[in-house]
Amino acid sequence: MADTPAPADEVGYAEALAELESILEEIEDDAVDVDVLAARVKRAAELLRVCRSRITAAKVEVTQIVAELDPEAGPAPDA
């Protein structure tokens, strides 16, 4: 990757997922340089943290929206 990637927390979910898929393809290559491998795994970890955080935030927001629509239903059970 020639360009410096955007900070992980500034990348959208879909973009982060696409970059993760690209990193996976890159690190599965037997010819990957060890120095590059370490940097790519570090970037993947950053992107995974961001994706998990965004999924959690979306889950909370959806739960709140549903609760507002039907306040008598109470909190949804954990899935």
Image (spheres, helix red, strand yellow):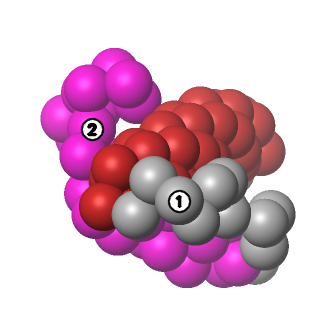
Helix or strand or loop: what does disc 2 sit on?
Answer: loop
Find residue 5 and name its label: none
Q: Residue 22's quadrant in the figure?
A: bottom left
Q: In the rendered structure, which segment of residues is drawn in magenta?
A: 1-29
Q: Amino acid at mark 1?
A: Glu
Q: Residue 34's quadrant in the figure?
A: top right
Which residue is at 26% across, 26% downward? 10
The residue mark sitting in front, 2 or 1, is: 1
Q: Residue 9's quadrant in the figure?
A: top left
Which residue is at 19% across, 35% downward? 3
Q: Residues within 10 Å of mark 1 (few under 14, many from 20)?
A: few
Helix or strand or loop: what does disc 1 sit on?
Answer: loop
Magenta stretch containing residue 12, yes or no? yes
Q: Going by the image, does 19 lie left or right of 6?
A: right
Q: Is residue 63 above or below residue 6?
A: below
Magenta stretch containing residue 53, yes or no? no
Q: Which of the two residues, 30 or 77, is positioned nearer the viewer here? A: 77
Q: Amino acid at mark 2?
A: Val
Magenta stretch, overall SS: helix
Image coords of residue 66 (percent x, y):
40, 62
Q: How many marks?
A: 2
Q: Which residue is mark 2?
A: 11
Q: Which residue is mark 1?
A: 72
Which residue is at 52% across, 44% downward? 60
Q: Going by the image, does 41 lie left or right of 3?
A: right
- Res. 51 visible in picture: no
- Res. 12 visible in picture: yes
Image coords of residue 69 (percent x, y):
30, 61
Q: Which of the two residues, 50 or 31, is positioned nearer the viewer here? A: 50
